[in-house]
Image (cartoon, rainbow, N blue to C red):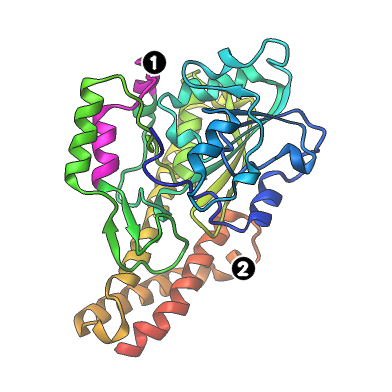
Amino acid sequence: MQRPFPRFDQWESAVFRTETLLASISRESRIIEIGPSYNPLAPRASGWNTTTVDHLTREGLVAKYRGAGVDISKIEEVDIVWSGGSLSDVVPKDPLGAFDVFIASHVIEHTPDLVGFLKSAETILNSSGLVILAIPDKRYCFDFFQPITTTGEVLTAHAEGRSRHTPRLGYDHYAYSVASGQQIAWGHHPLTSLRFASDLSEAIAVFKTLESSREYIDMHAWRFTPSSFQLLLLELARLDVLDWRVERIVESNGCEFYARLRRGAKVEALALDPAELASRRMGLLKQSVLEVQTQIDWLLAGDHGTADELSPDRALSLAALLRREVNRSHGELDAIRNSTSWRLTAPLRVISRWLRFSVKVIIGNT
């Protein structure tokens, strides 16, 4: 079954995406790209030494996307067709363990068994191999109202050896997915015209289909913010499940964030004493809440529609929120401006966007 929504990994500038995700990667590096579909990140046509894995042959992908408003000429020959089971089992033994780079753009959120998928990357890559991921940020796409994925959910799926999504996931995906106007993914700006992307009849139909058959229906099973993804990997490493540590996370200005992973997480996590581990986990949990606050801010900023429709009570409430944020951040602005860390500059970017919009709309109505 085709994706219930089209891919949205071209939302960002193609040049920005490529330069950010493939920074410092040589075209001679042995790359395996999973599920590039019609938008390969490291295409052989551009000189990359890439092995392509997808769920259909090139002919099948061309037929699937013809008439869908995408450039099907970018679809490359598929070297390995992966239709189920462990990814590492379908890669020929000769290159197994010899790849330098593992690329998955908007793939991990679709995998029924996320742990199994990342374990396959450990088998496919050499000892110094790099995992490059583009991951939809649940704050800025149709997952807006869905909760952040927990480690327990991911562990359960792996323990069950899932190869398809559960009825519960199917219902929730169709019942709570939303669009902002005509967009299923958006950036950091006030939200207006939110609407359901499906109705309850579709949600219960998918639920019943998954309950009564082995059919695979593609959907998002996992939802992250940058900090929640880091927390997941930290806990999985401490539990001796996965060895991937975050080398770098880049929060973009669009609907996705980027992560680079290297081996060595288990040694690092197991070396933490209980107090250090608790502090690190608590810090990531708090940061996850602060990240979700930004989606609340954009919802509040766009909820009133236009300035003329903003009621006095609502204007006072939003103005108070704005002033509180400015006052809280006043003593931190110098440090933020001088920082190159995404953790520090992210609040400044949010406040700047909030100020530009709110000063014109909110303060102007009070």
Residues tagged 2 and 1 counted as in contact (Cβ below 8 A): no
Is residue 162 magenta-colored?
yes
Is residue 203 magenta-colored?
no
SS of the residue under disc 1 = loop
* Quadrant assignment for the N terminus: top left
- To which residue does mark 2 refer? 337
Please tell me which residue is depicted at 25% across the width and 26% down the height of the picture. 210
Based on the displayed image, in which of its 4 quarters is residue 207 positioned?
A: top left
Q: Tell me if mark 1 has few (under 14), some (14-19) or many (20+) residues whose alpha carbon lies within 10 angstroms of its own.
A: some
**Where is residue 35 drawn, in percent x and y?**
56, 33
**Where is residue 47 drawn, in percent x and y?**
80, 40
Measured in 3D between alpha carbons, the distance from the residue under mark 2 to the one under mark 1, in whole angstroms, is 47 Å
Type of amino acid at the residue the image marks with label 2: Arg
* Quadrant assignment for the C terminus: bottom left
**Where is residue 177 drawn, in percent x and y?**
30, 48
Circle on res. 277: none
**Where is residue 216 drawn, in percent x and y?**
36, 26
Based on the displayed image, in which of its 4 quarters is residue 92 positioned?
A: top right
Magenta stretch in the rendered image: 155-175
- Badge 2 or badge 1: first in the primary sequence: 1
Q: Is residue 159 above or below residue 38?
A: above
* Main SS category, magenta section: helix
Q: Tell me if mark 2 has few (under 14), some (14-19) or many (20+) residues whose alpha carbon lies within 10 angstroms of its own.
A: few
Circle on res. 161: 1
Query: Residue 337 or 250: which is nearer the viewer?
Result: 250
